Image (cartoon, rainbow, N blue to C red):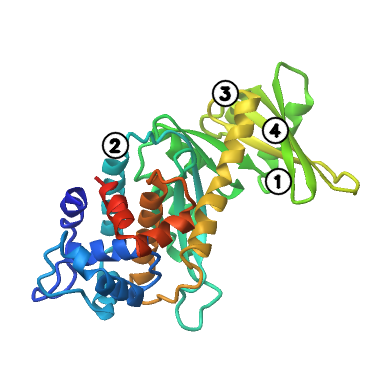
Amino acid sequence: MRKFKRIFRKLADPRAANARHELWEVLFIALAAGLGGAKGCCDMALFGRAKEELLRKMLPLEHGIPSHDTFSRVFRLLDPQAFEEAFRRFMSAFTKANGIPLTGVVSIDGKALRGAYERGKSSTPLHMVNVFAAEPRLVLASRKAAGRNEAKGALQVLGMLALKGCIVTADALHCNRPFAAAVLERGGDYALALKKNQSKLFNAVVRRFARGGKRTVAKRLEPSTHDRHESRRATVIRDTSVGVANNFPGVAALGRITSYRRLLGGRAEKPAVRYFLLSRYMSAKRLLQTVRNHWGIENRLHWMLDVLFGEDANRARKDNGPENLATLRRLVINIIRCHPAGISMAQKIKRVGWDDAFFLEVLAHMR
């Protein structure tokens, strides 16, 4: 609680000087409501009124619980970059206090907020670039992709991070020189998917694997699920020449993963082959783990944002509201996920709303 107040009270209040409710109190109630499953400003006001007696033990609430209009006004006017910076400072202090290392695989990917679009522009909704630490399953940062330019947004969000001890993964959209250089400048390494749209570089990597030479190989057989059998075979070659010849910074090794799939009772499908540029040599087994971990951003973040928090269905559209609410949802996910209760995320959210003792436990876990 003290940590939250210390960090978020430094935010500049965008409202008039005679605003009745302290900005940090409004944000704290919004966060508490989010932990209990609130999906919008009306939900925040309802949650606050339902929990007013409990909240008064933690907050002055000189003028009572803010109305839904107050929540809406705050999120519409609040500077999203300043709010996101406060989010990152809070998460840095939170992970340090809880002994959570933020190293290993860090995934970068974009996500559209389908309901956040200007009138008449439903085909171009707000686009966020998210940074996700795969092993602790925490959101490290997020940034709006201006003009829906995800590549540019990814470069901006990289500039906010310290990546020492991290392997940054991204899909083929981000397999470019500026992105690779930015990762290396921030102290990290990269494992970037490479596709045929970069024909010269792609063909050079394919030719390198066609030649002989020392390499490491590993195979992984996935448990049979969804009526199919899957296996993956990874190969890694130490090589700097491809990167030098194509002026691609930092390439130390090349990776290839061949995926095999067969539906139960059917014939095997044609193998799918993917190639990767690596700035640090890793074993073939480690490459399999790294690439597998990358997709955690889809399953453990984007899926939850839509299913548990209704992000795509959220109708906040005006001013800075959609971006600030997106940052708040990511903060809620991090706090809920780090609570040690051995139940699902959905059950934790329900218990926050139903069980005051558990609600206080979750807030105390924010120490």
- Under mark 2, the amino acid is Lys
Residue at (52, 64) in percent of width and height: 306
* Alpha carbon separation for disc pair 3 and 1: 23 Å
191 vs 142, left or right, is right
Position of residue 200 relative to residue 45, above or below, is: above
Mark 3 vs mark 2, foreground winner is 2
Question: Percent from the top left, x then y, of residue 210?
Answer: 79, 27
Name the residue beneath numbered marker 2.
96
Mark 3 vs mark 1, foreground winner is 3
Name the residue beneath numbered marker 4.
256
- Under mark 3, the amino acid is Tyr
Mark found first going from the N terminus, 3 or 2:
2
Please, what secondary structure does the residue beneath circle 4 have? Answer: strand
Mark linked to residue 196: 1
Residue at (47, 54) in percent of width and height: 345
- Determine crowd level at label 1: few under 14, some 14-19, many 20+ residues with C-alpha closer than 10 A: few
Please, what secondary structure does the residue beneath circle 2 have? Answer: helix
Mark found first going from the N terminus, 4 or 1:
1
Mark linked to residue 111: none
Please, what secondary structure does the residue beneath circle 3 have? Answer: loop
- Under mark 1, the amino acid is Lys
Mark 4 vs mark 1, foreground winner is 4
Task: Give the camera-side residue of 305 and 114.
Answer: 305
Name the residue beneath numbered marker 3.
281
* Alpha carbon separation for disc pair 4 and 1: 14 Å
- Which residue appears farthest toward the top when viewing the image? 214
Question: Percent from the top left, x then y, of residue 207?
Answer: 75, 30
- Determine crowd level at label 4: few under 14, some 14-19, many 20+ residues with C-alpha closer than 10 A: many
Mark found first going from the N terminus, 2 or 4:
2
* Alpha carbon separation for disc pair 3 and 4: 13 Å
Q: Do the residues labelled 2 and 4 touch (CB within 8 Å)?
A: no
